[in-house]
Image (tube, rainbow, N blue to C red):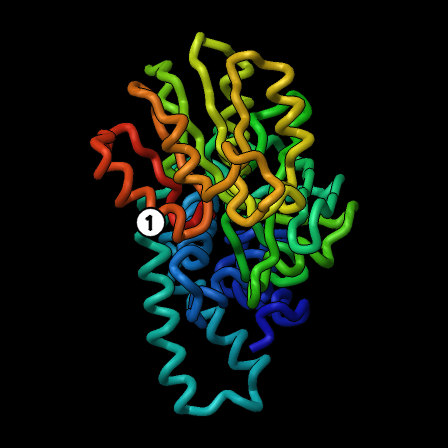
Amino acid sequence: MGFGRRPATGDFWCTLEDRQPGLLPHRDAPLFFTALGRLMVGGDDPANRAALLRVLGHAYRNFDLLPHATTIGDALLATIARHAHLLWTPQLAVVAKPAVRRATHAVRRAAGQAGDGRAWWHVQVIGHDRPSPDIAILTVRPWRRLPFQPGQAVPVCTPRRPGHWRWLSPANAPRADGTVELHVRAVPGGTVSDHLVHRVRPGELLWLGPPGDAGLRLDPARADDLLLVAGGTGLAPLRALVEQVATAPDGRRVTLIVGARTFTDLYDAIALDKLQCAHDWLTFVPAFSDDPCAEPAEQGDALTIALRHHELGQEIYLCGPPAMLAGARSRLPALGISAARIHVAGSFAR
């Protein structure tokens, strides 16, 4: 339907400006149009839909758009009709109108739950490393500081695939220079991840949406020892928690278990070794599920090895593949570990 085409986005802004002048800044119209259009079309998995709604909910609140939601929906339909005129039949129009109403209703609910603050941040890629063929470590610098907490996740979008957002968790605690490190694995059919890993280069711009809770934030009122269990790029938010502890050591000890198939799949080993050398309260343990050359104590899946290191009183944080998290939800309570001490990443944080 031309959601990513520049003429369509400009036409949308002009249509909206004719009907309600000054409603939406011109520079933000393309990002808004592609997100709302994608939500209208539907077909996204729950995580991507949640990212779209978080971005749009904050946009409607930030720009005070709720009183004008019907006007915006009508402008969207009018723009689509003009730019998809060869496909725009009476039958399609009948289907499109309720789709816009459903999208608007969903955005209204999201806006009601959104806090104050920006809907998106423009960021520049200043580093793009490829520690393995399907993983990239991106360092980005926001034009304005991104207010996030370690363990949170943020929606990410590339102009190469406008309207498509994916949740990623920063791999660092907030830095003095405001930069953010993102770890991403290219997955089959992954619209955003494939571009971030294989095509994005330093100097390019991305968009980050409002940070959201992924179930992994530390309780500031507690200082219990931590057992962190990571699989794949699920390492990112847990490494951020380690950095958070490092900024204000409070006597707690941290054990970080990082799962990989083989040693060569342990993509962030150098950074992890540096952290362990710098902090005597941190113990880093790799877990290799398919590496016969690994030490016996390091052979096995991450969850199994983590249980060997579990001690009473630890808070357990887990982020990784769905199978690992599902196993944790069943195995940990069966061992008598209190559910209050188990923190499993939400689905959009993986």
User: Within the image, what quadrant is residue 334 found in?
Assistant: top left
Residue 274, x across and y down, in percent: 66, 23
Task: Characterize the local packing of mark 1: few (<14), some (14-19) or many (20 or more) Cα atoms within 10 angstroms.
Answer: few
Q: Is residue 176 left or right of residue 331?
A: right
Q: Residue furthest top?
A: 251
Q: Residue at position x 37%, y 46% from top?
A: 325
Residue 244, x across and y down, in percent: 51, 21
User: Within the image, what quadrant is residue 319 found in?
Assistant: top left
Q: Amino acid at mark 1?
A: Ala
Examine the rendered structure and indicate whether residue 136 appears above or below residue 256.
Answer: below
Which element type, helix, strand or loop, lies under badge 1?
helix
| Residue indicated by mark 1 | 326
Q: Residue at position x 59%, y 80% from top?
A: 83
Relative to the observer, which residue lies in front, 293 or 102? 293
Q: Residue at position x 68%, y 43% from top?
A: 138
Residue 65: tell me if it is visible. Answer: no
